[in-house]
Amino acid sequence: MTILEERSRQWQGRGGPAQWAAAWERTRDLLSPCWTDDRLPPANSVEGQIYADGAAGLATALYLVARERGIPVADVHRADVDELVSRKEAETTPEIPRRWEARLRQLGHDLDDTADPVIARWHVLRTDRPEPRHDEDYSITRQGPGLLEGLGYVLAPRLDLQI
């Protein structure tokens, strides 16, 4: 088992809807060419946490679209994911995760039920980190919602994911 497989199974959690498992399988398939064992940072490092949020954000996006449209996860495309991440007119960056939360609620998820693996991971993704203080090193701190920071990394052109 690769490091990505091992870590992503922890990030996925146990149980949940079939589309949740399918979204994680597709996420692993998409990321495995880019995130080989020799390229994954330590899990407890800042970069390792960003990788975790990126993978979980992608899996959550695939899951949301597939469930809402009643389609297989394999039929979710890059434009669908980009639509979820993009700010709508007059929307602020912190409002994007709130929009995702509303969609999770519409799918029947209780945002307080951390026994639900989708929601357990969501609690990590929605963490909003403040801008670093003036005396902090920006290179070792995280900013903004983990969901957006992680997805920004995963969706960057350098990875060239074929979603």
Image (tube, rainbow, N blue to C red):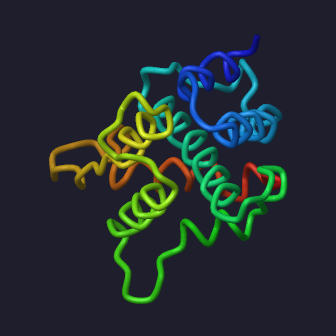
Quick check: 81 above or below 36?
below
Which quadrant of the view contains residue 46?
Answer: top left
What's the residue at 73%, 70% (across, down)? 79
Residue toward you, 67 or 138 = 67
Indicate the position of residue 68 as horizontal and vertical percent values.
Answer: 63, 62
Which quadrant of the view contains residue 16?
Answer: top right
Quadrant holding the N terminus: top right
Horizontally, is 158 left or right of 57 in the view? right
Residue toward you, 147 or 118 = 118
Quadrant holding the C terminus: bottom right
Quick check: 7 above or below 135?
above
Horizontally, is 102 left or right of 107 in the view? left
Quick check: 28 above or below 130?
above
What's the residue at 65%, 16% (across, down)? 6
Furthest-front residue in this view: 108
Horizontally, is 107 left or right of 90 in the view? right
Indicate the position of residue 8 as horizontal and vertical percent values.
Answer: 62, 26
Furthest-bottom residue in this view: 89
Indicate the position of residue 43 as horizontal and vertical percent values.
Answer: 50, 21
What's the residue at 36%, 40% (across, down)? 123
What's the residue at 36%, 32% (across, down)? 114
Q: Looking at the image, how many numbered discs can be counted on the residues? A: 0
